[in-house]
Amino acid sequence: MGRAIWLVAIGTLLSILVAGAAGAQGSGKATAKMEDKEGNPVGTADFAQGPNGVGISVNVKDLPPGEHAIHVHEKGKITPDFKAAGEHYNPTKAKHGFNNPEGPHAGDLENITVVEDGTATYQTTTDRVTLSKGKASLLDEDGSALVIHQKADDYETDDDGKSGDRIAAGVIESS
């Protein structure tokens, strides 16, 4: 009987320690409130740490129809004109683009397609970033932002894939 109580006590202690460690790393979730250059809300992006990387789900409206580049940028600031977000998130100093033999940047994502009514739903998973602490964390000390560009990314040209102006963005924040 004494041994059973001892095993239950050890199991309880281990559960408390594991839960505390998980809480110290954050919730494993983040969100970005997307806005246009005038500051109008145009949608949201949700991020969730999973076994295969970070899942990203984006729902936007009131954007120009067509294919647009979408990237994670290096700073958690978006004003003025989204330039404060800096360059693409690139902690490994890779070259830009999926088709570049020295790429891609950690923040490079597949293009998003906006349909004729100005809406888009987008989902992807990337293993080049994390929501946990570490070198590739989107939630590091200066944060990061999700940015949608005017044109499609060509997946090759360093340093931005010829993607044009930034038309929507949101700061990625732990949720």
Image: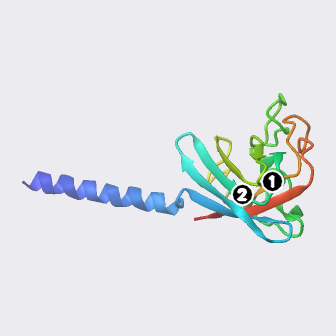
Total label count?
A: 2
Q: Quadrant of the N terminus?
A: bottom left
Q: Residue furthest top?
A: 101
Q: Quadrant of residue 59?
A: bottom right
Q: Residue furthest bottom?
A: 39
**Is residue 174 placed above or below 72 in the rendered structure?**
below
Q: Residues within 10 Å of mark 1 (few under 14, many from 20)?
A: many
The answer to which of 88 and 164 lies nearer the viewer is 164
Q: Residue at x 67, y 53 (%)?
A: 58
| Label 2: which secondary element | strand
Q: Quadrant of residue 77?
A: bottom right
Residue 68 visible in image:
no
- What's the amino acid at mark 1? Ile
**Spatial separation of the CA atoms under disc 2 and disc 1:** 10 Å
Residue picked out by circle 1: 148
The answer to which of 167 and 93 lies nearer the viewer is 167
Tell me whether the residue at label 2 lies in contact with that at label 1, contact meaning CB atoms closer than 8 angstroms. yes
**Is residue 126 placed above or below 20 in the rendered structure?**
above
User: Viewed as shown, does residue 165 lie left or right of 48?
Assistant: right
* Location of residue 97 in the rendering, given as x and y in whole percent from the top left corner: 83, 36
Residue picked out by circle 2: 60
* Location of residue 29 in the rendering, given as x and y in whole percent from the top left corner: 56, 58
Q: Residue at x 78, y 42 (%)?
A: 111
